[in-house]
Image: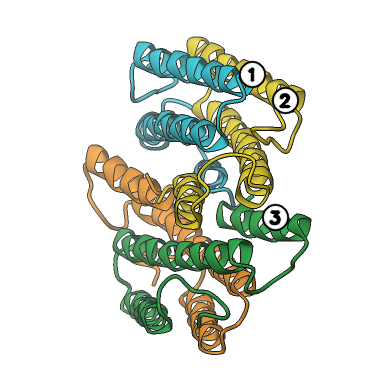
Chain colours: A orange, B green, C yellow, D cyan
């Protein structure tokens, strides 16, 4: 993983993603069981927080290894910044 | 579903959630294959958009059936509003 | 204000908005003085939190007085829900 | 501005911030005039979009001039990344 750069170890990321997958399945079950909408929404918000945490970890690693460490991605600073900012823009929904 | 109130039909919601589940698995594979962080982040942002869409659909249904339609949830207006606002507050991360 | 419905009193909202206005002016000064970007960004994030608080207060009032209380806005449930969801959708940037 | 690094020129940032300041005053007037909550919320969402644009511009500049260009801020990579990620974390409300 190091040559691509993920802050969390691959195992930690995989564990988080597996948990998120389970949470999504859980929401499906709640929908299947006609559970109260507010309770389902609470679960979806929890998934969002978990996803953001994975995204921040990935971005952290990217900045550390690719942007500063030069271990991957474009070498031209302009492209490096545009890539970074594109990712951040999508993260805040702009 | 009607007695609990989901804007989208149960099938539509389940389809969206199944797709999201697949997208999360896809991100896991990308991590496993040491794919470039920016590409993984792009997928995560797509999952977030899809999740928000499910959440908005659920909230729409809740407002329609429970808040206005009185088909579920608290009957006391104060509690109704607090529930609604709690869900919206969590949706915007506040 | 009651007939339009704002959770916070008009004075409380005006106080918050005046404070936000001052914070925006403060950011302008920081830019003028070439202050370090990260410090300026920290201020902008604080403004965002304050704005979200005002928005949640307004939405709370709207739900309480117009949606449930019937004191303003459309009377047709469909339009009521669409208005509410339009506002929430914009709040989460979708 | 270059030694501190803002993507947009200082004038462009100041123009955007002045506009945002005016928009916040406009919201205050709407509250004063008991305008319909949904209309006020629409204005607040517009302010949020404008603020995010200023924040993204600042972050872009920071990445370009400080993170990659080395023109300001910490020199130690770890601190550089932590600063960047702190700003991004606040931008997405985590």
Q: Where, quadrant-wise, is the C terminus of chain A in this rendering?
A: top left
User: Which residue does the image show at 62% across and 60% down from the upper left?
Assistant: B87
Viewed as shown, does residue C38 lie left or right of D5? right
Q: Position of residue D83 (x, y in %)?
A: 55, 41
Q: Pointers 1 and 2 in contact (CB under 8 A)?
A: yes
Are marks 3 and 2 in one subunit? Answer: no
Residues indicated by labels 3 and 1 sit on the same polypeptide chain = no
Q: Quadrant of the N terminus of chain A?
A: bottom left
The residue at 34%/43% (across/down) is A85
The residue sitting at 72% across, 32% down in the picture is C2
User: Quick check: C10 left or right of C4?
Assistant: right
Q: How far apart, in angstroms, are the residues tagged by discs 3 and 2?
A: 19 Å
Q: Are marks 3 and 1 in contact (CB under 8 Å)?
A: no
Chain of the residue under label 2: C
Q: How many marks?
A: 3
The residue drawn where x is 59% and y is 66% is B69
The disc at residue C10 is: 2
Q: Is residue D57 above or below residue B38?
A: above
User: Where does residue B25 sit, x and y in percent of width and height?
Assistant: 38, 82
Quarter of the figure with residue D9: top left
Q: Secondary structure at mark 3?
A: helix
- Left/right placement of residue D51 relative to residue D34 reads left
Tell me, for residue C60, which label it has, or none.
Answer: none
Depth check, front residue: A88 or D75 = A88
> Are the residues flagged by discs 1 and 2 from a single subunit?
no
Q: Position of residue D14 (x, y in %)?
A: 43, 13
Name the residue beneath numbered marker 3: B81
Q: Which residue is the site of mark 1?
A: D32
In front: D2, or D87?
Answer: D87
Q: Are marks 3 and 2 in contact (CB under 8 Å)?
A: no
Determine whether the residue tagged by mark 2 lies in a helix, strand or loop: helix
């Amino acid at each position: 993983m190091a040559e691509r750069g993920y802050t969390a170890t691959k195992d930690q990321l995989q564990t988080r993603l597996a948990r998120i997958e389970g949470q999504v399945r859980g929401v499906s079950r709640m929908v299947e069981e006609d559970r109260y909408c507010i309770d389902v929404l609470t679960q979806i918000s929890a998934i969002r927080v978990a996803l953001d945490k994975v995204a921040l970890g990935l971005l952290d690693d990217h900045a550390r290894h690719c942007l500063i460490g030069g271990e991957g991605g474009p070498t031209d600073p302009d492209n490096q910044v545009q890539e970074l900012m594109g990712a951040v823009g999508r993260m805040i929904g702009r």
